Amino acid sequence: HPPLVAHEEAREGRPSLEPSGEAEAPTIAVERPEPSPDRRISDAEHLETLPGRLVRREGEPETGDASVDEAYHGLGEVFALFHRVYGRDAIDGGGAPLEATVHFGDRYDNAFWDGERMVFGDGDGEVFRGFTQSLSVIGHELAHGVTEATARLRYRDQSGALNEHVSDVFGALVEQYAMGQDAGAATWLIGEGVFTDLVQGRALRSMLEPGTAYDDDVLGRDPQPAHFRDYVRTDDDNGGVHLNSGIPNRAFALAAVELGGFAWEHAGRVWYDTLTDGVLGPDDGFDVFAAATLAAARARFGAGSREARAISRGWRAVGLDP
Ligand code: ASN
Ligand code: ZN
């Protein structure tokens, strides 16, 4: 696990390669503190009113309320991934506060990004436990904010499925980053730990094997497609944004597993570049997105790089041809 606080040393003085006929100027190590998150956790106290009561601010000690403390800790992990790996300071890139509300509603069975904050329900206790128990869910919701601040993928049809996909990518990556886990060892599950023991299922979604996350009497089978030929056309769920995200999810996971090592360093880096390069528009669909990831891979790692080739193969495996 990477150290919690990294320090950069800025050196002042002459370049060390300069021939020294005279005494070296003293080297002064300047501590530049790394940007730290500015977390603000509120408690909706089981109402559906936002933001609720502010209960834990940055630097304040644990509250003893598991949901509050899980949200606080999880936001710190997601902040660390975006900042240390991609150089992004919080959701907006300018260090704005990371705001979350927990205990939203009465046994509320979901978590969401409302355009300003992350919101987490407690679950009904029968199907769902609390949504703050899953770091991939926390990463997923925060990433909705990053997408809104960058590529602005419109939340319907293919662009909406891509918006969901991007959130799953960073949800999976933050868990892997927090655990120091290789792509090949990762589960690629989103929302592991949100189901109770009564549910026949591992998680909300599987990025590597969409459609296999659960198969339960009450919930039915995981309905995600794993290939473009099975794209679901529906008016529900903003055009099936939580279903069709399975297609790009699988492309990403396949590429990352083929590359091996830490997914946040190669496939994740390419997806972050794609999201933030300014090449995407709000209505872009799978074809444009896939081509943009390939262009980003070539730009960062080289035209014939193994990253570019793995990403191209990942897309082709799900029926797209960037
Ligand atoms: N958990 C869902 C999401 O973040 C909630 C929603 O669709 N509003 O995508
Ligand atoms: Zn989402």
Image (cartoon, helix red, strand yellow):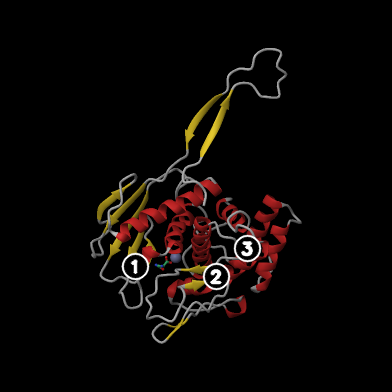
141 and 264: which one is in front?
264
Element at label 1: loop
* Disc 1 versus disc 2: nearer the observer: 1
Task: Tell me the crowding category of disc 1: few under 14, some 14 to 19, or many 20 or more residues within 10 angstroms, Cα based.
Answer: many
Q: Are marks 1 and 3 in contact (CB under 8 Å)?
A: no
Q: Which mark is residue 207?
A: 2
Q: Is residue 182 left or right of residue 221?
A: right
Residue 117 makes an appearance in the image:
no
Marks 3,2: beta carbons within 8 A:
no
Q: Amino acid at mark 1?
A: Gly
**Residue 90 % position (x, y):** 45, 48
Dot 1 or dot 3: first in sequence order is 1
Of the image marks 1 and 2, the number of the one nearer the N terminus: 1
Q: Is residue 173 left or right of residue 14?
A: left
Q: Earlier in the sequence, mark 3 or mark 2?
A: 2
The residue lying at 26 percent from left, 64 percent from top is 48
Q: Position of residue 93 (x, y in %)?
A: 47, 46
Quarter of the image with the C terminus is bottom right
Q: Which mark is residue 70?
A: none
Residues at discs 1 and 2 in contact (Cβ within 8 Å): no
**Residue for point 63% across, 68% down:** 254
Check disc 2 and report its element: helix, strand or loop.
loop
Q: Which mark is residue 130?
A: 1
Q: Mark 3 belongs to which amino acid? A: Ala
- Using the numbered discs, state the Cα–Cα distance from disc 1 to disc 3 in whole angstroms: 29 Å
The answer to which quarter of the image holds residue 193 is: bottom left
Q: For mark 2, does the 10 Å Cα neighbourhood hold few (<14), some (14 to 19), or many (20 or more) residues?
A: many
Q: Is residue 101 left or right of residue 269?
A: left
> Mark 3 sits on what residue?
256
